[in-house]
Image: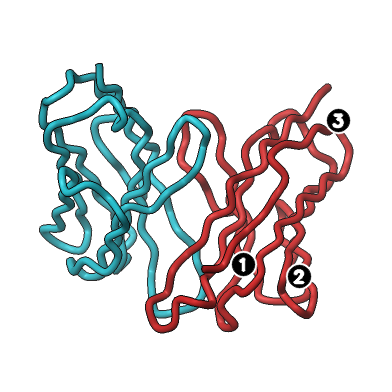
Amino acid sequence: DTAVSQTPKYLVTQMGNDKSIKCEQNLGHDTMYWYKQDSKKFLKIMFSYNNKELIINETVPNRFSPKSPDKAHLNLHINSLELGDSAVYFCASSQEGHTGNTIYFGEGSWLTVV
Amino acid sequence: LAKTTQPISMDSYEGQEVNITCSHNNIATNDYITWYQQFPSQGPRFIIQGYKTKVTNEVASLFIPADRKSSTLSLPRVSLSDTAVYYCLVGDGNAGNNRKLIWGLGTSLAVNP
């Protein structure tokens, strides 16, 4: 059973297109995240949701819009894709309510904008 | 904003012990220090977590001094399969009630035969 699953794993698209990445977790966690990892391997948090409510929204262009229909799902929609959006996007989840930071990551979605 | 610093890369040989240190000033007083491992084409995965002193599990040990301004991940007798990027993760002590997680930039460990 995959704990955090995201689709698609690979996505190649043209500039200006709109695309979505879906994420689901079956761990029963309350908090879900989207991270972006660039070519230099730097992990940058984009969004965090707790029980379907947005709690962290880092400095991300408003072309990126997360949507959480329920606490097990957090999808990422990207409008008007740009070359600089090419990166690996990781979905993750954790159980809040304690001070530990055990975050479970998905396998990543490789986005290439051409 | 709290900041973490860890070496960009390290080289080792099979069978050696590897110690990777992360400096993290001003971390949240009630937050844990966590280390993750990331293989190519995969998401980061949890290795070990601690609050203070020493923690050991089947994979690694984590040493945290009393001031908690640094932590050292220790991998005993590394093998080729330990070649990966290792990240430390802490909570930001400046974030107040809005808990903010600070990721290190990662240490790329290469284990050679």
Q: Which residue is mark 3?
A: B13
- Count of numbered tags: 3
The picture's colour for chain B is: red
Q: Is residue A3 above or below residue B71?
A: above
In this view, A57 is above or below B15: below
Q: Which is more N-terminal, label 3 or label 2? A: 3
Which secondary structure lies at badge 1?
strand
Instruction: Name the amino acid type tagged 2.
Output: Ile
Residue assigned mark 2:
B64
Left/right placement of residue A17 relative to residue B51 reads: left
For marks 2 and 1 on the same chain, the one whose residue lies earlier in the sequence: 1
Instruction: Kindly identify which residue carries mark 1.
Output: B33
Q: Nearer the viewer, residue B76 or B2?
A: B2
Check disc 3: other Cα within 10 Å, few if <14, some if 14-19, many if 20+.
some
The amino acid type found where label 3 is placed reads: Tyr
Q: Earlier in the sequence, mark 3 or mark 1?
A: 3
Who is closer to the viewer here, A10 or A59?
A59
Q: Residue at x 78, y 66 (%)?
A: B63
Q: CA distance from mark 3 to mark 1?
A: 27 Å
Q: Secondary structure at mark 3?
A: strand
- As drawn, is B80 to the left or to the right of A98? right
Residue B20, image x, y percentages: 76, 50
> Few, some or many C-alpha atoms within 10 Å of disc 1 (few <14, some 14-19, many ≥20)?
many
Q: Residue at x 69, y 40 (%)?
A: B8
Could you tell me if the residues under marks 2 and 1 are in contact, i.e. CB atoms within 8 Å? yes
Quadrant of res B71:
bottom right
